[in-house]
Every structure is written in structure tokens, then in C-alpha cells.
Image (cartoon, grey):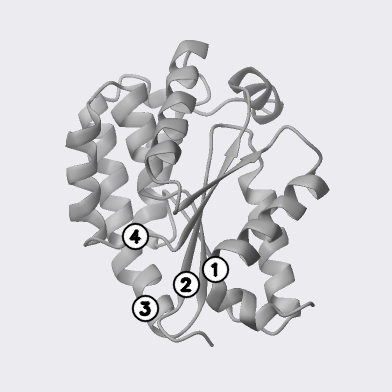
Amino acid sequence: MIEGGLLITFEGGEGCGKSTQIARLAAYLRRVGLDVREVREPGGTLVGEAVRQVLLDPQHSSLDSVAELLLYEASRAQNVAEVVRPSMQSGQIVLLDRFYDSSTAYQGFGRDIGRDKVEAMNHIATGGLVPDLTLLLDIDPVEGLRRATGGGADRLEQESAAFHACVREGFLTLAADEPDRFAVIDAGGTPKAIEESVLSEVRTRLPRLAALLGEK
């Protein structure tokens, strides 16, 4: 158990391998005896999973950009209140697949709603909760979409290459603005190479966790 818990978020464009790396980091942390909670956005709760179905369904291609943002924030608010904060308060390490940076990148930059407006909504939804570490898995959008859409594309994966390029630019801008919180990892390599980079960043940037990991 870690007093106050820890929140590690994974961000990146489509097909960057977040789910794979979260599973690998969770397995490693559990092997060394740490208590881990894996959560995703949108989703994580009954309410959030229902919202996820709406947001990713290709039939909802006419969804208004502001309505889209508000749905993400609704899922996020429920997730923080019901899962993320309680898990942290119990001393768990929360590994979160997407958080508010995704809204800033996708809706603020990609949809051109505006960074300031989206960040204000993020703050309301999270109550000011900030990750201890954000791992940005960076990949060329063309390659990422090729990986992600092999079995069919969801609503966001169907967006244009220009949209996904804006999203990537948004993520990299956020990382440049908060270098102490963000670690940018090249997601173009093998899963094993990415895993090693993730573990290195976790050890380097989270002293409370590194002390528990030791040399294991």
C-alpha cells in the first residue's frame, strides 16, 4: 500500500499500444507485491461504459463536438468519484487508460473547441486531480491508425488523417508545457522496448514507487 496512492495515466493517439503497456506494467507491479487498479476512459463505471458505447459507435457520426466533450467529462467525473479517488485513498496505484489530457488533445486541438475551454471543463470533472505521472506513447498517426483499425474502425478512428495529426500535435504541446509530469515514449518500437522505457520512466520519475521496487 502507498499512502495517498498514485495515479499514472497513459495517453496517446489511436493504435499507440496503451492497453498492452498498462497490462504489462500492472503485471510487473503486482509481481513485486503492489496493489494496482486498472481503469479506462471513457468507461470504468456502469455510467461510463454506457457513455463509451455512445461515443465510439460509428452510427453517431453526427455527434456535436461540444456534446462529445460533455459526454467525456460526464464519464470522467463519475470515474473519478466512484473509482479513481477511492482507489487512491485506499493506497492503490491507479493505472488509467486516458484522462483529461485526451480531452484537451482530441476536443481542444482536434475539434478546435479551444484548450482553455476544455481545460476548464476538465478541472470541473476531476475536481483538480492531477496525475503523478503521464506516459505519452507517441506514434505517427498513419501507423497508429493502421494498427488500430485492422478489425474495423470506431467513430474516432474514422476521423481524417488531418484530425489525428492535430491530436498528436496537441499531445506533444501538452507534454512540452508540463515536462515534469509527462514522459514521452516512442511507441513505434516493439512492445518489449516500449515496456522497458515505461519501467525506466516510472523508476526515474516516481521516487515513492522506485523505493518500493528496489532492484526487482
164 horizontally vs 63: left or right: right
Instruction: Name the residue carrying label 4.
Output: 130
Question: Mark 1 or mark 2, which is nearer the start of the sequence?
Answer: 2
Which amino acid does the dot numbered 4 rest on? Val
Instruction: Name the residue carrying label 1.
Output: 206
Q: Please say if the residues under marks 2 and 1 sit with CB atoms less than 8 Å apart.
A: yes
Disc 4/disc 1 C-alpha distance (Å): 14 Å
Return the residue nearer the eye: 62 or 15.
Answer: 15
Give percent across and percent down for residue 122: 25, 48
Disc 3/disc 1 C-alpha distance (Å): 21 Å
Instruction: Name the residue carrying label 3.
Output: 86
Q: Please say if the residues under marks 2 and 4 sit with CB atoms less than 8 Å apart.
A: no
Disc 2/disc 4 C-alpha distance (Å): 10 Å
- Within-10-Å neighbours for mark 4: few <14, some 14–19, many 20+: some
Q: Residue at x 37, y 39 (%)?
A: 177
Q: Residue at x 74, y 70 (%)?
A: 28
- Within-10-Å neighbours for mark 1: few <14, some 14–19, many 20+: some
